Amino acid sequence: MSIIRYADDFVVLHEDKEIVNRSKEFIEYWLKNIGLELKDSKTRICHTSDGDNPGFDFLGFNIRQYNVSVHNCGKSKRGFKTLIKPSSKSLIKHLKVIKDTLRKLRGANQTAVIAKLNPIIRGWNQYFCTAVSRKIFEKAAHQTHQKLWQWAKFRHSHKGLRWIKRKYFKRYGKDNWRFMDSNGYFLFRHSDLKIKNHTKVRGDKSPYDGDYLYWSQRMGRHPMVRSNVATLLKV
């Protein structure tokens, strides 16, 4: 059995559903003794690959196993592949934040809109960049572009579409539709960020074990190593 916990959120994993059910009963009993209980809307027992709604959401990610041929499942040769992606709820929530932000900035200029949206987009991307997120990033970029186009048309309802395009969307590299002001200040796109494969921490390592070389190479920083040295070690 495996238990993954973050703050008050946790997941119990086991191949036997009966053991999972018994674990749920034990957790409910234990929580009751300290005056707490599981929240029904967030508690779910499911299979990671079978059933009507396989997989589960955890901390904004969707974890699910997909049945594939033994030639495409890696070294395990078990006939399935585990993929961790941004959940649909996370994407919907993020796009709503962008929509609400643009609605509040209908009277603002383009530079102010870019300055407000860039941290929102970069922060969301950085959180999910270690998962299988490429298609989700492209979808988010497309949806954001549509919202920006609507924002621009609302500001200039009496102007033609070509005029609006020339004013707000300019050429940046091979991209002819980059949301960019006249000074070259542009909006960061979700699809700009490269996916960074997560490397699991070695089981025999701890941030307090004194291995400055390992943690500097992994994170690019360490409180006991100068920042320029840690950066060089990571590279």
Image: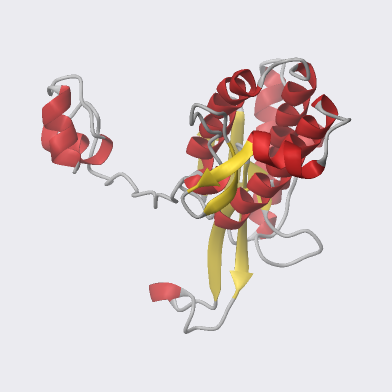
Relative to 47, residue 161 above or below:
above
The C terminus - image quarter: top left
Q: Which of 187 and 185 is in front in this view?
A: 185
Name the foreground residue: 193 vs 24: 193
Q: Can residue 128 be seen in this view?
A: yes
Along the viewing direction, whichever of 213 and 203 lies nearer the viewer: 213
Q: Does residue 197 lie above or below 207 as drawn?
A: below
Q: Position of residue 84 (x, y in %)?
A: 56, 53
User: Quick one: which residue is furthest to the right in this view?
Assistant: 158
Q: Name the side, left or right, on which 90 lies relative to 106.
A: left
The answer to whether 104 is drawn above or below residue 96 in the figure is: above
On screen, 183 above or below 169?
Answer: above
Residue appearing at x 61%, y 31% in the figure: 9
Query: In this rendering, does residue 211 appear at all?
Result: no
Residue 38 sits in which quadrant?
Answer: top right
Q: Where is residue 134 in the image (x, y as percent from the top left)?
A: 55, 55
The image quarter containing residue 40 is top right
x then y, percent, for residue 207: 24, 29
Query: What is the x, y in percent for residue 81?
Result: 53, 68
Q: How many marks?
A: 0
- Front residue of this view, candidates 12 and 16: 12
- Left/right of residue 153 with respect to residue 10 in the rendered view: right
Left or right of 14 on screen, residue 235:
left
Seen at 76% across and 32% down, the residue is: 152
Q: Which residue occupies 48% across, 31% down? A: 184
> What's the coloring here?
secondary structure
